Amino acid sequence: MMQVMATRAESAALTRRALLDAAADLLDLGGPEAVTLREVSARAGVTRGAPYRHFTGKDSLLTALATESWERIADQVHTLRTDPALSGSDKLRGALRALIGVGRDQPHLYQMLFRRHGHRPEELGEGLDRVRRRLCAPAGAPAADRIRAAGRFQEEFLIIVTDLVGERNARHYGALLLASAHGIADMELTGHFSTDSLRTTSDELVDTLVRMVTDAGETT
């Protein structure tokens, strides 16, 4: 009996993974509009009803993707933060490049991560999707997981910043760095660095930010 239960759990986990991978592929190819449960099911090779055994609808599926992405970024930053071979400036440089790299490699996902309030996947539910969410899952659970994962990234990032500028200034410089990284990612996506007008690159701008913060930490 235990083996049967384990097999069912493993099968369910594999199906959920296939659905998430299929949704991620569709998101990369065409943005959130390309992610429909019908297309996700077809791409994952499962029945049309299979997604509803794992997600309350498209919104919760996209929210799960966002949560996984924040977890991956947080893992990357944690690895950088705890690497004894790296200097504080190298840790900060790596963390900024990890975030900007998502924007470069997965622009649709990146934009979904930073949607303003009211435009995040878990806040867009309508009709049947909203009903399924209320009946089939704890209210706000997907959103809570997403917020927790994003918060974990922020905590890891702020520890790196704190080591450079001190606890009193960490949030100020942390906000400045994240706003700058977001702007760099957006300018790279829109092709501003591919022209001769600015004559710089995202990596050069990251290096400048790291030097500025490191210098600020040394003078405080």
Image (spheres, helix red, strand yellow):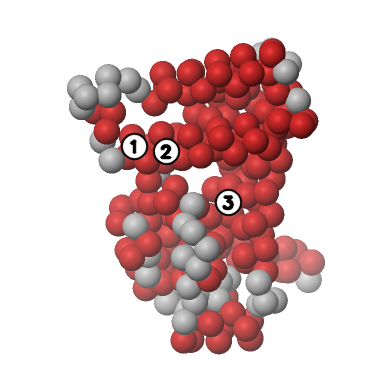
* Front residue (pair 190, 56): 190
Q: Is residue 182 above or below residue 86?
A: below
**Residue visible at 37% across and 62% down?**
32
The N terminus appears in which quarter of the rendering? Answer: bottom right
First in residue order: circle 1 vs circle 3: 3
Q: Is residue 52 above or below residue 102?
A: below
Instruction: Inspect the image, locate mark 2, and give the three-letter code of the amino acid beneath it.
Output: Gly
Inter-mark Cα distance, 3 to 2: 23 Å
- Please tell me whether mark 2 sits on a helix, a strand or a loop: helix
Horizontally, residue 28 falls left or right of residue 97, namely left
**Residue visible at 69% across and 13% down?**
218
Q: Which residue is mark 1?
A: 187
Q: In the image, residue 98 lies at what x, y percent?
A: 52, 32
Could you tell me if the residues under marks 2 and 1 are in contact, i.e. CB atoms within 8 Å?
A: yes
Q: Which residue is mark 3?
A: 68
Horizontally, residue 195 falls left or right of residue 64, namely left
Q: In the image, residue 38 lies at what x, y percent?
A: 37, 73
For this orientation, the residue located farthest to the left is 196
Horizontally, residue 105 falls left or right of residue 12, namely left
Label 2: few (<14), some (14–19) or many (≥20) C-alpha neighbours in 10 Å: some
Q: Which residue is mark 2?
A: 183
* Front residue (pair 110, 52): 110
Mark yes or no: residue 137 visible: yes
Inter-mark Cα distance, 2 to 1: 6 Å
Could you tell me if the residues under marks 1 and 3 are in contact, i.e. CB atoms within 8 Å?
A: no
The picture quadrant where one finds residue 37 is bottom left
Could you tell me if the residues under marks 3 and 2 are in contact, i.e. CB atoms within 8 Å?
A: no
**Residue visible at 68% across and 18% down?**
217
For this orientation, the residue located farthest to the front is 220
- Please tell me whether mark 1 sits on a helix, a strand or a loop: helix
Instruction: Inspect the image, locate mark 3, and give the three-letter code of the amino acid beneath it.
Output: Glu
